[in-house]
């Protein structure tokens, strides 16, 4: 029988409305890859007795209990104590962890205090789960025939320890791994994806379809049990044939990674001229390790004066057609390409709102241009949503335009 | 005594990883306005027996239980049945609701089927809570000395029924609103905050302390019941005195908002020269509506050639001290300030990793400079964590340096 997994999330911020609890979704998404689903998520405040009782309850139902949050050094970090109460364990200092934290403090010239060493407290008998992105490690302890995992609360750290330590252990426990195929798509909406697929997706084939829509991208996942491998392969072929134009990856990676890899293999470079996105495209490209090989830099031409001075956009052009126009986007792309001596230049100009919209040029109107030896192209978009969503969608479509232009052929 | 509120969320999509559960945050945010906090959120699948047991458990702890989801007309909408099981009630058709749904179907030419009238099933004795944005109404039923609310699952409908029906009823039940004070801090770690506060925070005063740490910022919240108002005021004074240097706001807002507001009130402008942050500082500033008043733009000088060509950093300086140095950060800040004619120039150069580090200049070494009529300053940082965290911390400390320089005095 497959393991049953429950999550117990702790943290005042999760119940005060300050932050949305993303732990359950993160865990569930990784479980889904193993063909498992989360049996229950219980979110409770940082209260030792309450948490201890919740862990005890969870242990009566699930074979694996994951507890998130409350592993820091402050007085409201009571997870270790609560779990110790629940299973009758002691707390001990893990010397290697303590030494590691001391070193890190020394290296970064931070003031050391004994309070910090609470970060190194673990349940006696527990295995320490290294945390590559934060101070407090996770831990795993076996209790009777159950496994209890303690994970740090910050989502980045939660996911790092989850991926590094829990997923591999679960994979070993899962009996029948489902077949999975992921498609990452850009430039198409979820409803159009549905429209292009067979009615009711793939009825009677044993292939299940799951969608996950994000701003300007859609993830499609086909799952089937090994028994339905032929039907699964057929469904994969249908998706490739009907949606190939929009598929940028067949694994769960972000568009900027695909792009940096593509340009690196081409030996090509890019420079960006951003107005309404304010630097987001550069930020996303530089999130990719090694992007310095392909990203030369750019100009955040937020004020029109910068468009003229730094990108050589003719002032009279802005006068005539306005800063938010295909012509200015093209001039920005060409200007930054020339200035930086890049193979590709991206130009983005638009109205992110909430103010600044007019009858003729409403909030959400964005022009994106790409200049290269493959020719210069500009596209017009009408995005909806709040300011940050419009910026996000603009950056996504700018990267997609670059992907399509780079894909045309090797540069002459 | 104030009511205690628990949420029971149901829905396969919440446990499959497809959607994040926003119900808890929505409810908690509205409770916080009343000085209440959510006591617990239990998320479970659409299983009648499991849901029924969870509601029974919640009723043993809380005076008010909110159940979300599963009020539709499909076979997996089992919330009414499960709650009926839990409190031993019958289900009856609510004729007005049924008639209303029939009308809506007629108006929108949708096919009517008796299955749809499941939407009109309610617990006998329950009060129907109108749903202005969807088909299925909510309902409220009193059981012993408790109140049970059933709310539709779609977040828009959940919030509509919450705001229209639950919030007014809760307001009438709340006895005393607690005192709350939030401090947002930058440039100090959670453990240093703890070290600077009284041992064990404020023991015996009735003042409770909650922390929420993010990359390069810490939120501190002091809460107390009205009876402890003097102790609360004293604790607030102690925090201001000991941590004032790092407090950038006493309400829950982000650093970029504080900065845009500060510069706008000063009538000052800023331009950015970003290397390792790759545009993140510009992105964050332009996330703030109206930032065009104070942000002129910037240069993403990722390649050294751009530092020289676009920012006037002397090539021999880069030769001599290296691109990652206080001198180059200062030259970048001064160069972008001059080029854009801004009151403040920010320069950021560092090694975000994972590659590119050396013995002398390790990954995480970042220099941040600010140039203005208040003088030019540069600071050296040693950040830890993955690439994106180092970028995030760098952008945070750059905004903090700007905040401090702008705060020195009105510009001459």
Image (cartoon, coloured by chain):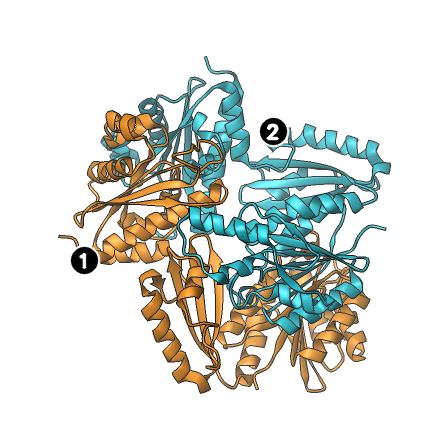
Chain colours: A cyan, B orange
At horizontal 63% and vertical 63% (from top left) the residue drawn is A80
At horizontal 54% and vertical 73% (from top left) the residue drawn is B31
The residue lying furthest to the top in this view is A412
Q: Which mark is residue A4?
A: none
The residue tagged 2 is A245
Quadrant placement of the C terminus of chain A: top left
B288 vs B316, nearest the viewer: B316
- Above or below, A355 relative to A331: below
- Above or below, A4 relative to A326: below
B29 vs A264, nearest the viewer: A264
Q: Residues within 10 Å of mark 1 (few under 14, many from 20)?
A: few
The residue tagged 1 is B409
Asked where in the image residue A336 lies, by quadrant, the reply is top left
* Residue A302 x/y as whole percent: 31, 41
Parent chain of label 2: A
Distance from Cα at disc 2 to Cα at disc 1 = 56 Å
Parent chain of label 1: B
How many numbered dots are placed on residues in this image?
A: 2
């Amino acid at each position: 029988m497959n393991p049953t997994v429950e999550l117990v999330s702790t943290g005042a911020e999760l119940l005060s409305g300050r932050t949305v609890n993303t732990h359950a979704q993160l865990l569930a998404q990784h479980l889904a890859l193993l063909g498992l689903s989360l049996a229950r998520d219980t979110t409770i405040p940082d209260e030792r007795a309450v948490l201890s009782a919740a862990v005890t309850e969870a242990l009566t139902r699930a074979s694996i209990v994951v507890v998130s949050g409350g592993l820091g050094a402050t007085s409201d970090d009571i997870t270790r104590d609560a779990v110790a109460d629940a299973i009758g364990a002691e707390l001990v200092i893990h010397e290697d962890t303590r030494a590691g934290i001391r070193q890190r403090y020394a290296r970064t010239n931070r003031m050391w205090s004994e309070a910090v060493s609470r970060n190194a407290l673990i349940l006696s008998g527990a295995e320490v789960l290294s945390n590559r992105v934060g101070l407090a490690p996770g831990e795993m302890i076996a209790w009777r025939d159950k496994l209890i995992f303690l994970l740090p609360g910050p989502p980045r750290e939660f996911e790092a320890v989850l991926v590094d330590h829990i997923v591999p252990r679960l994979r070993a426990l899962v009996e029948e791994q489902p077949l999975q195929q992921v498609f990452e798509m850009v430039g198409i909406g979820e409803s159009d994806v549905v429209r292009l697929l067979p009615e009711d997706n793939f009825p009677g084939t044993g292939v299940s379809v799951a969608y996950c829509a994000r701003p300007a991208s859609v993830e499609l996942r086909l799952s089937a049990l090994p028994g339905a491998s032929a039907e699964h392969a057929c469904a994969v072929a249908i998706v490739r044939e009907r949606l190939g134009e929009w598929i940028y990856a067949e694994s769960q990676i972000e568009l900027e990674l695909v792009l940096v890899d593509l340009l690196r293999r081409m030996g090509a470079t890019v420079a960006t001229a951003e107005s309404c996105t304010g630097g987001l495209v550069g930020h996303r490209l530089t999130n990719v390790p090694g992007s310095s090989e392909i990203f030369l830099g750019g100009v955040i031409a937020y004020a029109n004066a910068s468009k003229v001075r730094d990108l050589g956009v003719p002032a009279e052009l802005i006068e005539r057609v306005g800063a938010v126009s295909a012509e200015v986007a093209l001039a920005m792309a060409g200007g930054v390409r020339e200035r930086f001596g890049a193979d590709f230049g991206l130009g983005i100009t638009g109205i992110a709102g909430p103010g600044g919209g007019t009858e003729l040029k409403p909030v959400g109107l964005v022009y994106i241009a790409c200049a290269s030896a493959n020719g210069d192209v500009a596209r017009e978009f009408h995005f909806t949503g709040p300011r940050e969503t419009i910026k996000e969608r603009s950056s996504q479509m700018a990267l997609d335009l670059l992907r399509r232009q780079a894909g045309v052929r090797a540069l002459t």
